[in-house]
Amino acid sequence: MEQKIHINLNELKLLKESPSLVKFGAKIKRMLYHMFAPMGTSWSSFFSVSGNPKDIQLFMAAISSEKRYMDSFLRHGLNDKSVLNNRYALEKSVSNFERETGIKWPLK
């Protein structure tokens, strides 16, 4: 069984070093992998996020936007209007996350 993914946003705010950000990116990659698991799989049981409530809300908005963008891209291709709209929403979510938390979003 795969180990549960835990992201501590408070710790990431303190450790703005490259190895910490690389680990953060790897964790997000694994989270997205589980989010694309076959239907019936409870992807939320594979990860947890800790930090202050506003930071968690911003993180969840960004990761959800990543998923919506990827779903849309896989369904419609790159040049579809809905894909572009999801891309803009993703960029806004990521920008909000980075501005409010001071943590760089590792996927760009």
Image (spheres, rainbow, N blue to C red):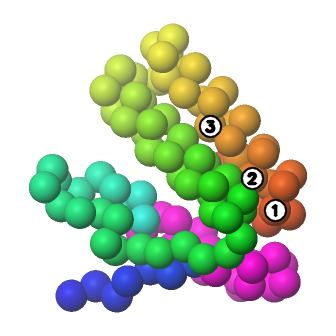
Q: Nearer the viewer, residue 30 or 61?
A: 61
Contact (Cβ within 8 Å) of mark 1 with mark 2 = yes
Q: Is residue 93 above or below residue 103?
A: above
Q: Nearer the viewer, residue 78 or 39?
A: 39
Q: Is residue 95 left or right of residue 2?
A: right
Residue 52 x, y percent position in the rendering: 71, 71
Q: Which residue is mark 2?
A: 97
Q: Label 3 is placed on what type of residue?
A: Leu
- Where disc 2 sits, the SS reads helix
The answer to whether one can see residue 22 in this image is no
Q: Which residue is mark 3?
A: 90
Screen quadrant of the N terminus = bottom left
Q: Label 2 is placed on what type of residue?
A: Phe
**For the residues marked 1 and 3, what is the alpha-carbon distance in whole angstroms?**
16 Å
**Residue mark closest to the camera, 3 vs 2:** 2
Residue that appears at 81% across and 76% down: 13
Residue that appears at 69% across and 37% down: 91
Kindly identify which numbered label has been placed on residue 101. Answer: 1
Contact (Cβ within 8 Å) of mark 3 with mark 2 = no
Q: Which residues are magenta?
A: 8-30
Q: Nearer the viewer, residue 6 or 91?
A: 6
Q: Is residue 71 above or below residue 45?
A: above
Quadrant in the rendering for residue 7: bottom right
Quadrant in the rendering for residue 50: bottom right
- Where disc 1 sits, the SS reads helix
